[in-house]
Image: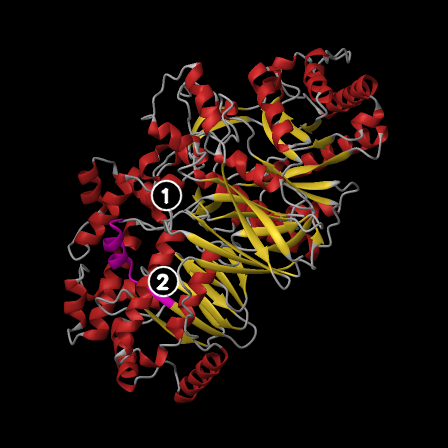
Amino acid sequence: MQDFILKNGEIMDFDFYIHTYEPLHFHQDIELFYVVEGSVSLTVGDETFSMQQDDFIIINANKKHGYSSEGEVLISCFHINYQMLSILLQNNFILIWCNSVIDKNEAYMDVRRIIKQILNQYFDKKSRGIVYLNSLYYELLHIINSNFLINVEDKRFNSEKKERLDNRLNDIVNYMRANYNRPISLNDLADKLYLSNSYLSKYIKKQLGMSFVDYLNNERLHHAMEELLYSDHSITRIALDNGFANTAAFNKAFKEAYHTTPSQYQAKKKDKLKKKAKDVSESKKKLIEKRIHEFYDRNPVKPEVVAEQGDHYIIVDSAKGEAYQQNWNRMVNIGEAASLLRSDIQEHILILKNDLHFTYIRFWDIWGKDMYIDINNPEGDYNFDIISRVFDFLVANQMKPYLEIGLKPRKLLRSVNNMLINEKSSVGFENKAEFKRFMPAFMSYVMNRYGIKEVETWVFEFWKDEEDNKSASFYYELFDMTYDIIKSFSHKIKFGGAGLSVRFGMKNFYEILESWGKRKNHPDFLSFYLYPYVPGDEEGEKFTKHSTDSKFVKNQLVMARQVLEEIKFSVQEIHVTEWNVTVSQRNSMNDSCFKGAYIMKNVIESIGLADVMGYWVGSDSFGDFYDSKSLLNGGGGLISKDGIRKPAFYALDFLNQMGELLLRKDENCMVTTNGHYDYYIACHNYKHFNYQYYMKAEDELDIRKQHRMFVDNERVKLNFQINNVKNGTYRVIIHTINKEHGSVQDEWMNMDFYEHMNQKDIDYLKKVCTPRIFMKTSVAKEGLLNLETILEPNEIQLLQIVYQY
């Protein structure tokens, strides 16, 4: 709100409003805009968001914003002291990306919880409740800092000038904040930075969104406002004390910002403060208070129930099993088509097929230069000999190709903003006619070589570059053309796309599907990429921040299904063709026990939401590069480049041993049965990252300090009670992977991270990097079977409970 002023020394304050309109304005304070009741259209910069009850958006400092509403509203605005926050965070340029309208994150629920606790203290703001209120303010800031603060390392898209958060900008901002009360000029600052006036003027305008004079005046007005309201100083003294040349300059700047003079504003506001009124009339004040009391009645703050730390109770009825789809073992990603010709990759694929029972192998760049197809041949004289070797290998080993036929670039990343390899497809079609000539020839070849019955089981996917909105119509045309060609051979062949990411925003996702829905051909399946990064845009500067959402995969799938239902977009299946906690192939978390717990947790949560969960990626050999000489290099594979099974591998192995009927899914487990008195439980003690993880580049994590990067390192005790079981004795077999048993990263740590392993060392690690097995018996009486297990942080377990005849 433009008339909201924080007192000196306050970190945060809030108030309620029932205005139906607030014109565009800006201020130095960060603002959290929360809709208590009603619906509001909030404009921030060039964007407008339709907000409903419980929605909130954080508006960054000096960002123009305003709102309007057609009906009754109750709004709460929180102002956060930018200068105090910058001192606390030791960061002179704070940027926050927090918008519940277009993003879904478990942290939003935490923010809402604290907001409601704060709002319930409204009538105690001036009394002893202020101590408790301040504790809530800092708790809210902690959640915002941990989940929504943009870090320098979050930038993903390289603009021509990486100046948004650099030292020069800090120097400019710090200089103006330190010298606002002195007669400084653009020329003074330019001399200090050894820059020309014209360059510095343009730079400030681009980076701060306003001119040097406007930013300096805004800084001066921010400080002058406190003196206007809380001191008896004259207007002249206030003007001079805060850097204005005279009262005329002060009056002009003030009137441009607040549409009134300083003296008029001071008289009006001081009169209001004396009367303790918050609006233009006593009746409006009473109306606001009435609305607030009604809100409190509907939203009482409930005392938190504190359970015993680490104890969870899971009660299951064995008579209520439901069939479910195992979506995790249908497909796994391998890499470019050429990589499937490597003997080590083929060996790893066979391990994945034989041990984890994958049916489909996904690969791309099938038209690449290493295939020697000559896709641009004007005579249609194509060479399919090399690509047929890939298909031959898969078919001979009873596996199915999952072909990505789009021209995906080849990327190998150290971190989200540090690429080892970024190569566009080495070949491409000159025009649509060339593509239209090629595809029928390719389909004819595979049909004749492998037979229609075989090819009808293959899956074809067509990727779309979601960051390139200009290519949308061209993509739809190519998709329609390819769809018609493939279906002309057989309607049973599955063809879909387009590797979408809901993370680009609900609005963007909605528009893509709405446009696609108007086309003549719809995909047999929609494919998604789920990596926990959220892109944003601030003053035209693009960035990507880690999503801190512990349920990112689940929430993205829920949002996708909501949009599909809203626009009535009919699709047979949802395929997550790529998913992982990181895009980095140099992130040590990929090799750790954490990864096993992460995979098990997200697979369990995805059951019923996705038909295919295609993990990225099957083998660490995908990330081979000049720097990949160590035993482990932070690759995202299920198995290491030497064929050692990692905790991620065993997460899927444990899940593969579940029964056909699902009895219950829980925060830490899934319980299943085979319907014949045997029960199977997959469980984990997943620990989500804390702020320390998000403040580091992904390729710079210290393996020995990984334990510091989780929300806690507590054990968890799971207590199971299975009802309606057959009385008698059950053998309980517990398979476990944790830091002490079966973790290749921890075994390597015990070897002091020795880099020059020989084959005997590798063979030893292959033998010891397997689950530890424990056994015990449990007796069921009166139809009840009770058992318990304890898991270390990020431990995974498989419990096989077998009836003894």
Could you tell me which secondary element the residue under label 1 belongs to? Answer: helix
Q: In this view, does 287 lie above or below 439?
A: below
Q: Quick one: 291 or 640, which is closer to the camera?
A: 640
Residue 420 image offset from top left, x and y in percent: 44, 24
Q: Look at the image and say whether residue 554 sits in the magenta stretch.
A: no
Marks 1 and 2: CB-CB under 8 Å? no
**Crowd rating for badge 1 (residues with CA inside 10 Å; few <14, some 14–19, many 20+):** some
Q: Look at the image and say whether residue 87 sits in the magenta stretch.
A: yes
Residue 750 is labelled as none
Q: In this view, does 421 lie above or below 97?
A: above
**Crowd rating for badge 2 (residues with CA inside 10 Å; few <14, some 14–19, many 20+):** some
Could you tell me which secondary element the residue under label 2 belongs to? Answer: helix
| Sooner in the amino-acid sequence: mark 1 or mark 2 | 2
Residue 483 image offset from top left, x and y in percent: 78, 33
Q: Quick one: 600 or 87, which is closer to the camera?
A: 600
Q: Name the kind of residue labelled 1 in the image.
A: Tyr
Q: What stretch is highlighted in magenta?
A: 78-91
Residue at 27% x, 49% y: name it: 91
Residue to which mark 2 is pinned: 140
Residue 581 can be seen, yes or no: no
Q: Is residue 1 above or below residue 320?
A: below
- Distance Cα–Cα, label 1 vs label 2: 20 Å
Residue at 31% x, 26% y: name it: 752
Residue 657 image offset from top left, x and y in percent: 62, 41
Kindly indicate the quadrant of the structure image that contains residue 145: bottom left
Residue 693 is labelled as 1
Q: Name the kind of residue labelled 2 in the image.
A: Leu
